Amino acid sequence: MRIVLAGPRGFCAGVNMAIETLETAIRIHGTPVYVFHEIVHNKHVVDRFVREGAVFVDRVEDVPEGSVLLFSAHGVAPEVRRVAAERRLLAIDATCPLVTKVHLEAIKYAKGGYRIVLIGHEGHDEVIGTMGQAPDAFTLVDSPEEVDALPFGPADRLAYLTQTTLSVDDASRVIKRLKERFPHIVGPPKDDICYATQNRQEAVRILADDADRVIVLGSQNSSNSQRLAELACERGIPANLIDGASEIDPAWFRGDETVVITAGASAPESVVQDCVRWLVDRYAATVEERTIREEDVYFPLPKELRPGGAAATAR
């Protein structure tokens, strides 16, 4: 067996920042530190922080008044911030800056009188937070067929935005159809799909063509991890999205395959290495790193946790 480790893989700058933010908040303030939704969509990361004293909530109203509340990497609606302030919570914002960019675009378009078509997956935390920036302005679509059903006409001022973790190919198809139906529609000056999502998809697209199977490390509720597995399957390569080595099925292998292993942007490198060891131990697999694109993006801690910030001093 030959293992090809895809690069880049695993944590992106936004996830690194969010995890470091929660670690720092726990170190400064002690526990419990409350987190609105999962800090990132990964079971291993969430379970680790639960053991360390983080409490994940889906309602701000469930956080005791005066507590520390961290907003996850996926971003939140202004209404969430309002309720947090009303409850006198010490709010720490770990929203990925690339998600914040989409929020600012949404606010700009809404103030300009545009109807905004958001390309994304219904119910995803990021989509909920983005649509919450201007609830009356948004319509959500996730396919060209849904674009065909939109009720807008030539007189409507239209703009589009995208969820940051979509399949580049899927988003391109929807944008293409939007522009065909509504030639006057406007969009952001730069692509909203984040650099890390695009890079991980590019690596799978290139490496999967020489593979017999692709294993993607990531949780089922991770949008960008799901897209990696789907991308391999679309190219005719069997793919499995798993949380860790315990979910590997020996029936997937003969023992002489080329297996590409990658990881979604919220999956720890430790689970990748666990899977590599599992395959090496059973099939004497060789391991090769293949990096398609280098990444050097870094996001600093939220201003609340920088020296002098409101949350940088212990309660």
Image (cartoon, rainbow, N blue to C red):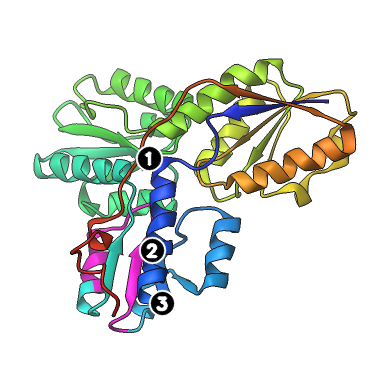
Q: Is residue 249 above or below residue 80?
A: above
Which of the pair 132/182 is nearer the observer? 132
Q: Earlier in the sequence, mark 3 or mark 2?
A: 2
Q: Amino acid at mark 1?
A: Gln
Mark 2 closeness class: few <14, some 14–19, many ≥20 residues within 10 Å: some
Highlighted range, magenta: 65-84
Left or right, 309 with respect to 166, comes to: left
Q: Is residue 211 above or below residue 129?
A: above
Q: Which residue is mark 2?
A: 24
Left or right, 33 with respect to 52, comes to: left
Q: Amino acid at mark 3?
A: Gly
Give x and y (percent) for residue 216.
64, 37
Q: Earlier in the sequence, mark 2 or mark 1?
A: 2
Mark 3 and mark 2: Cα distance apart in space: 9 Å
Mark 1 and mark 3: Cα distance apart in space: 34 Å
Residue 76 among magenta residues: yes
Give the residue drawn at x 43%, y 78%.
32
Left or right, 201 with respect to 274, comes to: left
Q: Amino acid at mark 2?
A: Thr
Q: Which residue is mark 1?
A: 163
For residue 30, the mark is 3
Q: Is residue 308 above or below residue 277?
A: below
Give x and y (percent) for residue 223.
51, 43
Location of the N terminus (image quadrant): top right
